[in-house]
């Protein structure tokens, strides 16, 4: 029995080594493929997409690589489970070779998970640090002012509360605010709220940060690398019209952005400045979202024949 057990241990070690080498080979093959290509082939593994900023690309790559690593580990473990089920299924009353106090085996299944977690933690810390990193001299500074239930975007000439606002865009009940930004430049956002906690979020940036009232000014930076128009939202439940607290991000080339900003500095409205960079007519307004319903029309929400507040409803009800 002991001779059989001693002979089986080398074979088991060889099998484990072979499985480990196979998993490593699979990892090398996958790493040779494009991370974005693998992500697209599998629906980004639940991630929204690659994003439109340099920071978003790094988060996307980390997500796809982590998912691939998890799948490799999962396939390896599943393979071991089914191999053990088939290889060591009951064939009689004789017990199979026992592996208690097998030091190499115990080291393998203790050290390997620690190494996997350590590697994931290392790359997560790198990406998180990069996403949160602030430069000393950003190319553009935008102050985000949130209020119930809209946005104000102030283009600033420097960092901090002491800086001056050189141009501004304010949303209203009738017009969605448009935030025009350049690609290829470091853009710093400085956030503040006039009332309650809001949250500044553009889904394609793959990042959001809360907007606090008072002395707290949250900051973060992005670098856009793709032109386009994208809906922005408040991602923090802030009151009655929270769901309609939207804005639109318009990313353009640096030259077009400079034209837009100069037009704003000269006193042009946001729509006039948009027309100056080629967005005329309806394109001068938001195209990704619509203004929220203020109940100022004849009928209230979901009440076809109801009378809106302030139009004699109390008098009618008294009758």
Image (cartoon, helix red, strand yellow):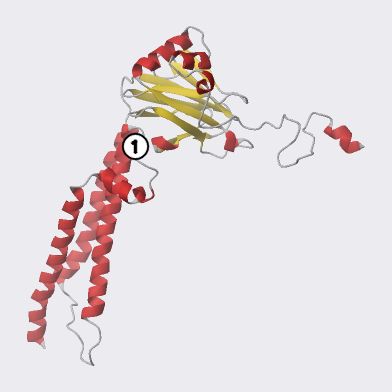
Using a 10 Å C-alpha cutoff, classify the residue at mark 1 as few (fewer than 14 neighbours), some (14 to 19) or many (20 or more).
many
Please say whether residue 85 is visible from this viewpoint.
yes
Q: Is residue 175 above or below residue 316?
A: above
Where is residue 19? Give x, y as percent. Answer: 16, 65
Is residue 217 found left or right of 17 in the rendered image? right
Which residue is at 18% across, 81% downward? 98
Of 36 and 314, which appears nearest the observer? 36
What residue sits right under mark 1 in the picture? 56
Which residue is at 20% across, 60% downward? 111
Which secondary structure lies at badge 1? helix
Q: Residue furthest bottom?
A: 93
Is residue 258 found left or right of 96 in the rendered image? right
Quadrant position of residue 57 = top left
Q: Quadrant of the N terminus?
A: bottom left
Which residue is at 83% across, 34% downward? 313
Where is residue 137? Give x, y as percent. Answer: 31, 19
Of 58 and 30, which appears nearest the observer? 30
- How many numbered circles does the render carry? 1
Please say whether residue 163 is visible from this viewpoint.
no
Q: Is residue 114 above or below residue 11?
A: above
Is residue 275 found left or right of 129 in the rendered image? right
Which residue is at 39% across, 35% downward? 205
Q: Is residue 131 above or below residue 253?
A: below
Q: Quadrant of the C terminus?
A: top right
Q: Residue furthest right?
A: 319
Is residue 298 found left or right of 139 in the rendered image? right
Of 50 and 58, which appears nearest the observer? 50
């Amino acid at each position: 029995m002991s001779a059989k057990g001693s002979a089986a241990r080398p074979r088991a070690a060889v099998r484990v080594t072979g499985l480990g080498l196979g998993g490593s080979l699979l990892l090398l093959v996958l790493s040779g493929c494009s991370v974005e290509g693998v992500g697209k082939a599998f629906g980004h593994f639940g991630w929204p997409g690659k994003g439109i900023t340099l920071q978003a690309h790094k988060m996307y790559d980390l997500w796809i690589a982590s998912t691939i690593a998890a799948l490799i580990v999962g396939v390896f473990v599943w393979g071991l489970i089914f191999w053990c089920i088939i290889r060591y299924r009951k064939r009689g009353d004789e017990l199979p070779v026992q592996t208690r106090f097998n030091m190499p085996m115990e080291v393998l299944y203790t050290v390997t998970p620690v190494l996997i977690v350590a590697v994931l933690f290392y790359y997560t810390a790198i990406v998180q640090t990069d996403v949160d990193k602030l430069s000393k001299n950003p190319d553009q500074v935008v102050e985000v002012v949130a209020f119930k239930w809209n946005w104000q975007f102030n283009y600033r000439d420097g960092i901090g509360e002491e800086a001056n606002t050189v141009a501004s865009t304010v949303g209203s009940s009738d017009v969605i605010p448009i935030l025009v930004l350049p690609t290829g430049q470091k853009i710093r956002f400085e956030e503040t709220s006039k009332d309650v906690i809001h949250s500044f979020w553009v889904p394609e940036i793959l990042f959001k940060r809360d907007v606090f009232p008072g002395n707290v000014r949250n900051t973060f930076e992005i670098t856009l690398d793709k032109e386009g128009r994208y809906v922005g939202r408040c991602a923090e439940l802030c009151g009655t019209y929270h769901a309609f607290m939207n804005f639109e991000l318009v990313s353009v080339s640096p030259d077009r952005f400079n034209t837009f900003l100069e037009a704003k500095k000269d006193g042009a409205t946001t729509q006039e400045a948009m027309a100056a960079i080629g967005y005329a007519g309806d394109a001068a307004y938001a195209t990704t979202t619509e203004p929220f319903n203020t109940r100022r029309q004849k009928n209230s929400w979901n009440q076809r024949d109801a009378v809106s507040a302030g139009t004699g409803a109390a008098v009618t009800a008294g009758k």
